[in-house]
Amino acid sequence: MGRARERRERVLEQLTDLPRLPLGGAPDPAFRDRLRAELVTGPTTAPITGPITGPITGPITGPITGELLPERSARPRHAHRRPPRPRPLLSQLAAFGLAAAMMVASFSTYQAVPGDSLYPLKRAAESALVGLSTNEAARGERELRSAKARAEEVASLLGSSNGGPLVGRTLKDMEESTRAGISRLRRAEPRSPKIKKFARHQQEVVAPMLQQLKRDQLAQAEGYLDYIKGLVAPG
């Protein structure tokens, strides 16, 4: 018990004297100089002397003397497209042949006469052009062009051996196109000089045919010429 009391009293004396002890002096001058130099120059790191193979996630403050490896591309290998191959000669020849065939077919259709296999296509194209015209005057001019085409077809049929029965039908189509075109053109342009010009042209084409026409065909052609003369006469 006596030793324990002595130990407790000694501890109490040390605690009593603790407030009177000095708290310590100023830092050492050499320490302050070293601390100031580190704060001014920043942290120092060892130089990098080996190759860098991984990503750099922090700032680099020291010299880099090693080799920087190139970054691998993140694109997959299949992303690189091959340059387009030139079209083979066979494809180019096929395209050229197709274009040439279309041009020949168009020309053949334009030159077709009654009785030819392409003639219905020619008449359908003429009707389509009339329907696609933008105004009444344009439709009338298209109809008159069709009438001129029918007159030329009659002349071709008269020169062939098998054109007899088709002549009368073509003369009828010529008159129908003429009357439709004149009617449309008069509504749009009552005093259009195109009417008289067309009438004179048809007279020059149809009149020489009279000597080659049969009796029923001759009546059709003479009736058509009488109608045309009325267009040419002043009025």
Image: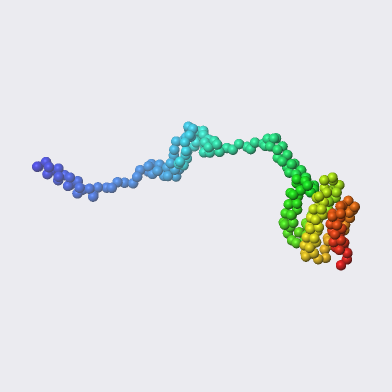
Residue, far top: 50
Residue 63 position in % (x across, y down): 49, 37
Q: Is residue 20 left or right of residue 134?
A: left
Name the residue rendered at 82%, 53% in the picture: 168
206 and 70: which one is in front? 206
Residue, far bottom: 235
Name the residue rendered at 53%, 38% in the picture: 75
Q: How many marks?
A: 0
From this viewpoint, is residue 106 visible? no
Residue 93 position in % (x across, y down): 72, 37
Residue 96 position in % (x across, y down): 73, 40
85 and 96: which one is in front? 96
User: In which quarter of the view is residue 137 placed?
Assistant: bottom right
Residue 135 position in % (x across, y down): 74, 61
From this viewpoint, is residue 36 visible? yes
Q: Is residue 60 left or right of residue 25?
A: right
5 and 224: which one is in front? 224
Q: Is residue 216 above or below residue 99?
A: below
2 and 114: which one is in front? 114
Name the residue rendered at 88%, 51% in the picture: 212
